[in-house]
Image: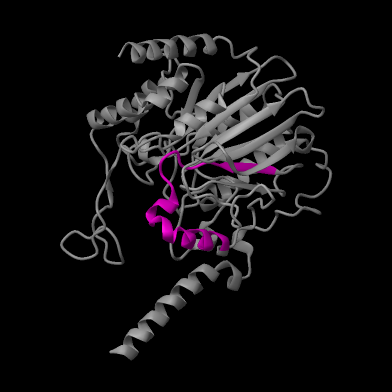
Amino acid sequence: MERLVAAVLAAGVLQVLLATADDHYLLSRIAFGSCANQSAPQPIWDAINKFDPQVFIWLGDNIYGDIRRPFIFLGKERTIGPWQNAPRFIPSSSSEMLSRYNSAKNVPGYLRLRAKAKVVGTWDDHDYGLNDAGKEFSAKSTNQRLLLDFLDEPQDSPRRKQAGVYTSYTFGPPGKQVKIILLDTRYHRDPLSSDGSVLGDSQWSWLGKELRGPPSAITIIGSSIQVISNLSGTTGPLFYMESWGRFPKERDRLFKLINDSKRDGVFFISGDVHFGEITRYDCAAGYPLYDITSSGLTQAVEKVLPSPLRFIVRFLAWFTPSTMRVKNQNCRYRSCTYGEPNFGAIQIDWDASPVNLKIQVRDINGLPVTGVDISLSELQAWNRTTKAGQDQRHCTLEVKLPWIVRYRLAILVYSVLACKQFLMLLVS
């Protein structure tokens, strides 16, 4: 108990000290992650602590605050299927949300991290309060306070007065500054498939000022949902995932804002999807835009199947078309995705010339499963005078693929089901 109290006090003191030291704190190691069920074991904190980050970034689903109901196909209340008439997820009370935050905040491995690193973050849907929810969610104001309390946000912080949890931080001395911009993709988001707004007018105005403001060597934009990848374009009509690609006008607006700001050194980090991957888009700015997705700290897509069958998930991940995914020798699996618990790790070598970035998704043991080494000179607008996408590789959006390629996953699944049905008819 004494160690626990000491760790909590140390974490509070550290947050205060680092909050006042942002202007000169040379940042070289950053960890990030998402999707941490407070009721599940969380051994991955050991690997994160071993990495020894100076800053840790929460990218959402920091707790699972809503209530998941069981799959019910038949009966009075059906939570799944074509005849669904009841929600699969329902909100929990604010007292239950607080209890779940307290559980998450007191995980021993996370306590050790808080005692030595600055912790910042944003939210996604399950800590916002309801799966896939947007601006219509009525408890968002109360849950904003709960998230900020979890993050030890000062009581006089502007985040406690604004509508939404978006914010930014700047670390480092002049010439070696790292700017971290955290977006809120929930508070103002219009309904899915509306192609409406993701950020809302006030957050768009703020983001424009942030990107057009004083330059920094590196700018990391944290989004709870994926920015570059739009796998829903190739997994539909089987299932759909949230992403900026579901709001194509908003994503184009984001890319244009980055390009027009003439800001160098920008890349994205994201979570949400329960697997890790690295994607890039060569057609938005004068240099490639990367999106490093780490998801989740406990929640992972391969966990839906027993270990002997997890090769099926890996096969489907490889078979599903992805035009934006970075595939190189650093990938553990052929698909260059990783569907087990993971976290993101960023290392900045300021002594290299030019400055070098090593960005990885790492497993529960701290070993890399996919990664990229990027020279900072690659993230500079050396070709703004050329047309976007000219002589560049990752430029074909998923929705622009030929239909036979785009829908091959659905074709495979429906073909298997049809064969199964045919065989059952033959047997009968």
Tell me, yes or no, whether the highlighted magenta stretch contains residue 76: no
Nearer the observer, 250 or 38: 38
Residue 214 in the image: x percent, y percent?
Answer: 69, 21
Q: Is residue 195 left or right of residue 394?
A: left
Q: Is residue 349 left or right of residue 341?
A: right
Residue that appears at 28% across and 52% down: 88
**Residue 167 in view in this figure:** no
Q: Is residue 375 left or right of residue 67?
A: right
Q: Quadrant of residue 6?
A: top left
Question: Which quadrant of the figure contains the C terminus?
Answer: bottom left
Residue that appears at 24% across and 64% down: 73
Residue 404 in the image: x percent, y percent?
Answer: 59, 73
**Residue 233 in view in this figure:** yes
Nearer the observer, 266 or 255: 266
Residue 385 in the image: x percent, y percent?
Answer: 84, 43
Which region shows up in magenta? Answer: 289-318
